[in-house]
Image: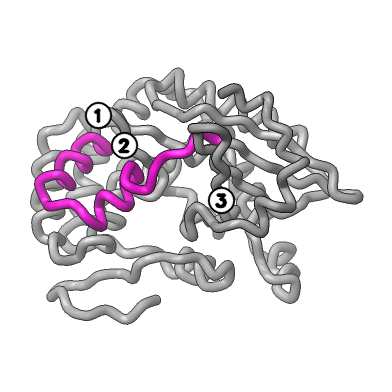
Amino acid sequence: MDLQDIDIAKHLHEIKKGKEYSQLGFFSKPYRIDIGTEGIVVKVYHPIKKNSVFLIEAHNKYIADLKRCGINVPDTRILAIEKGIEQELVILQQAFEKEELVRTIFEEKPLETLLQLLSLMYSETIEFWKKKSVNDKIGFHPTIRNYAFRKGSLFYYDTFPPMGMPQDQLNKIIVQMTPISDWLKWLKHVVPTRIINKVSDEYYFVEKTIVGILGSSIRLRPEYAEEFLKFTKGYIERSALGSKEKKYILQKIDSPPKLSLLWRIMRKLTKNVGKPNISFPIKKQIQD
């Protein structure tokens, strides 16, 4: 199915009343529609007064950049719908079944399967940084909830916000596009964007990306924490990463990696679903 043929504006009201496809979206809550035998995910973002044309162009370029670096991206379309004096960004994307989502696989499958997926994600992450030019100002966030697994291949579907830009510019977009209660919107005008580096560093530094993937896997399956840590140490030691990156990762994974305080605060403010940090010894954790 050609996503360009879908008149999404006609169905948008009904979509918003429908069932959410996932509760894990940070910038949007995705919905699913079925057209014929195919499923389409619809991601609706909060309306903005400016930058819609820039964001659409940056989004399309980012997908091209990802594919150039060897990343599989499902068919995706972005458009802006007029909403008074604002524009509402909407993304249409080829849907995956729940059992194809890597997060679902991590929640349900045995250790052997999970280690195979970790290996694939680590390999894809390292290959991405190897293939992109050193001059490319481009980020990548290959965490577990951003992947699907179909017919033996990973598919990366987290295309917004587009990260084909310098980190400081992305930070401004993160602040602009973060959905937040009306009474807290004043925060967007006082938060220094450099503080967002605590979150976005994971998108721009391969060593922090690897640590982030490991942390997500442990939070989802804490009973396998020791196995994940041991596997990751061995993988990194054998990898083609530079000595600086290896040293950073190995120092950070002596214990389960933790989400930053800023990210946990952002999750609470936006009512985002997520798992708590894990500590040794593994025991019942308090949801953060």
Q: Residue 84 location in percent, x, y? A: 90, 50
Which structural element holds mark 1?
A: loop
Residue reaching furthest to the right: 85
Label 3 neighbourhood size at 10 Å, few (<14), some (14-19), many (20+)?
many
Amino acid tagged 2? Phe
Check disc 3 and report the residue beneath it: 30
Which structural element holds mark 3?
A: strand
Residue, x 66% and y 51% (percent of image)?
A: 15
Is there CB contact under 8 Å for labels 2 and 1? yes
Amino acid tagged 1? Gly
Q: CA distance from mark 3 to mark 1?
A: 25 Å
28 vs 88, left or right, is left
Membership of 114 in magenta stretch: yes
Check disc 1 and report the residue beneath it: 152
Residue, x 60% and y 46% (percent of image)?
A: 43
Residue reaching furthest to the top: 68
Tell me: residue 228, above or below residue 75: below
Between disc 3 and disc 1, whose residue precedes?
3
> Magenta stretch mostly in which secondary structure?
helix
Residue, x 31% and y 69% (percent of image)?
A: 277
Label 2 neighbourhood size at 10 Å, few (<14), some (14-19), many (20+)?
some
Between disc 2 and disc 3, whose residue precedes?
3
Please state which of residues 17 and 86 is positioned toward the viewer in this rendering.
17
Check disc 2 and report the residue beneath it: 149
Please state the extent of the stretch shown in magenta in the rendering. 93-122
Amino acid tagged 3? Pro
